[in-house]
Amino acid sequence: MEFDLIHRYFHQLGTTHDNILCGVGDDCALLKTDKTLAISTDTLNCGVHFLENDPPELLGWKSLAVNVSDLAASGAKPLAALLALSLPQIDEKWLSLFQQGFDSCAKHYNIALIGGDTTRGALSINITILGETKKPLLRCAAQANDDIWLSHETGWASIGLDLKCNGQSPAHLLPQTL
């Protein structure tokens, strides 16, 4: 069952890179690189990071995009990702839409899906992303008077979740056109 799901929904995702020797469907992914490898992982749990009725295509995009952000912060170019899904049951429509969102993000950033895992359990999405950099940027190397750069405004994901979950949220007082 697991290998059938992998083949139907995730085997074709992403792009092929010359340095990916073996990807999705084997026991281990194999990558060759002569640069510094940057690796990050994030888990998104239903009820904590997203709601059960959130659109699966948006979850597919978001689950990969939050990891791309980590690579960007480290000065790394995305290369490949591993996807681990815990699903309460097999929902073909949900998986298809999730795959579409994930694939859109993967194509946008030229990321190959090279492996992962599926299991039965509470809905949870875990992404491990790998990237390359010649000159890593490290938060632990930051010093007083260093510049901090943001690509977008911060806090909107938290406000959005509060709006969905809390009818009494002060966020409801924000103007509709921000």
Image (tube, rainbow, N blue to C red):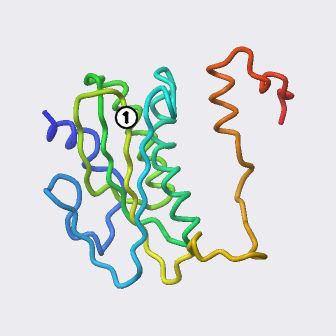
Badge 1 crowding class, 10 Å Cα cut-off, few under 14, some 14 to 19, many 20 or more, is many
Image quadrant where one finds the N terminus: top left
Residue wearing tag 1 = 124
Residue 23 position in % (x across, y down)? 23, 60
At 51% from the left and 43% from the top, the residue drawn is 62
Q: Relative to 107, is 20 on the left or the right?
A: left
Q: Is mark 1 on a helix, strand or loop?
A: strand
Q: Which of 118 and 79 is in front in this view?
A: 118
Q: From this viewpoint, which residue is outermost toward the top?
A: 167
Residue 128 position in % (x across, y down)? 37, 55
What residue type is disc 1 on?
Answer: Ser
Q: Is residue 57 above or below residue 93?
A: below
Q: Relative to 79, is 152 on the left or the right?
A: right
- Snapshot quadrant of residue 120: top left
At 41% from the left and 47% from the top, the residue drawn is 103
Q: In this view, does 62 lie above or below 75?
A: above
- Snapshot quadrant of residue 171: top right
Q: Which of 42 and 77 is in front in this view?
A: 42
At 14% from the left and 56% from the top, the residue drawn is 26
Image quadrant where one finds the C terminus: top right
Q: In this view, does 163 lie above or below 23?
A: above
- Total number of numbered discs in the rendering: 1
Residue 13 position in % (x across, y down)? 33, 50
Residue 37 position in % (x across, y down)? 39, 74
Q: Relative to 115, is 41 on the left or the right?
A: right
At 51% from the left and 25% from the top, the residue drawn is 51
Q: Relative to 3, is 72 on the left or the right?
A: right
Q: Nearer the viewer, residue 170 or 33?
A: 170
